[in-house]
Image (cartoon, rainbow, N blue to C red):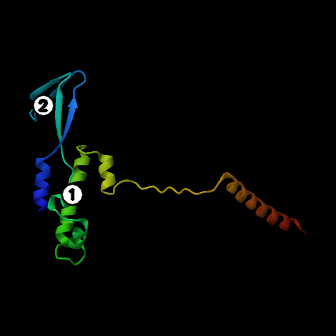
C-alpha cells in the first residue's frame, strides 16, 4: 500500500499556476533546447513534487493514527515495515528540500532538523525586578557592614 501511495504522489504533483506579469519566460529541455515561450498575460503551470507525509499515507490507505501506532509499536511484526515507510517519507522530503524543490525551512521543521530555542516568559513586573535588586543590595550591604565592625 505504501508503494502505491508513493507512486500516486509522483503521478499527482502539486500544480502551481502562475500568471506572467511582464517580460518573457522561456523553458528549456535538458539538452538546452527551447520548448515554450510565455509572454505577459499568459499562464504558466509548474508541476511541483508532492511532499510525502504520514498523514497523506493514512488518508490514502484508509487507516488512522491509532492503527499506525499499533502497527509500528516495538515488537509488532509490522514495526520494521513502518520504520521503512517513515524513512522513505523523511528521505524524500530531505532530498527535495536539499535541491530546493520543496521549501527547505518548512521541511527542516517537519523532519526535526530546525534549531529549537526556548523562550521563557514570566509575570514579573518592573517593580518585582527592582524589589529583587534592592533585596540583593541590602544583603550585600549587611555583609559589608558586618565585615567593617571591629
Q: Is residue 60 left or right of residue 136?
A: left
From the top left corner, tell me how far across and down residue 51 is, in percent.
Answer: 21, 50
Residue at the image position 14 percent from the left and 51 percent from the top:
9
Q: Is residue 136 left or right of residue 92?
A: right
Could you say whether the residue bearing mark 2 is in a helix, strand or loop? Answer: strand
Q: Is residue 102 left or right of residue 134?
A: left
Label 1 crowding class (10 Å Cα cut-off): few <14, some 14-19, many 20+?
Answer: some
Residue farthest along the right direction in this orientation: 150
Q: Toward which corner of the image does residue 83 lie, by quadrant?
A: bottom left
How far from the left and from the top, in percent, is residue 78?
Answer: 17, 73
Q: Is residue 137 above or below residue 23?
A: below
Whether residue 73 is situated above or below residue 56 in the rendered picture: below
Reply above or below: 11 against 83. above
For the point 29% across and 51% down, the residue is: 107
Q: Which numbered disc flags the more N-terminal residue, 2 or 1?
A: 2
Q: Which mark is residue 28?
A: 2
Quadrant in the rendering for residue 145: bottom right
Q: Residue at x 60, y 57 (%)?
A: 123
- Give me the C-alpha separation between circle 2 and circle 1: 30 Å
What number is the disc on residue 89? 1
Specify few, some or many for label 2: CA neighbours under 10 Å numbering under 14, 14-19, or 20 or more: few
Q: Which mark is residue 6?
A: none
Quarter of the image for residue 25 reads top left
Residue nearer the viewer, 54 or 34: 54
Secondary element type, mark 1: helix
Relative to 13, residue 143 above or below: below
Badges 2 and 1: C-beta atoms under 8 Å apart? no
Q: In front: mark 2 or mark 1?
A: 1
Q: Image quadrant for the N terminus?
A: bottom left
Amino acid at each position: 500500500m505504501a508503494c502505491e501511495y508513493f507512486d500516486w504522489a509522483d503521478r499527482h504533483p502539486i500544480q502551481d499556476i502562475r500568471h506572467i506579469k511582464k517580460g518573457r519566460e522561456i523553458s528549456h529541455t535538458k539538452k538546452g533546447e527551447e520548448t515554450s515561450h510565455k509572454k505577459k498575460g499568459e499562464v504558466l503551470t509548474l508541476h511541483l513534487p508532492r511532499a510525502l507525509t504520514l498523514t497523506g499515507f493514512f488518508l490514502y490507505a484508509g487507516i488512522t493514527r491509532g492503527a499506525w501506532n499499533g502497527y509500528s509499536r516495538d515488537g509488532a511484526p509490522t514495526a520494521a515495515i513502518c520504520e521503512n515507510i517513515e524513512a522513505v517519507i523523511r528521505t524524500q522530503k530531505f532530498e527535495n528540500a536539499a535541491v530546493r524543490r520543496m521549501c527547505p525551512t518548512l521541511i527542516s521543521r517537519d523532519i526535526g532538523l530546525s534549531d529549537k530555542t526556548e523562550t521563557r516568559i514570566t509575570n514579573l513586573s518592573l517593580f518585582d525586578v527592582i524589589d529583587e535588586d534592592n533585596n540583593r543590595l541590602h544583603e550585600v550591604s549587611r555583609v559589608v557592614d558586618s565585615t567593617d565592625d571591629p
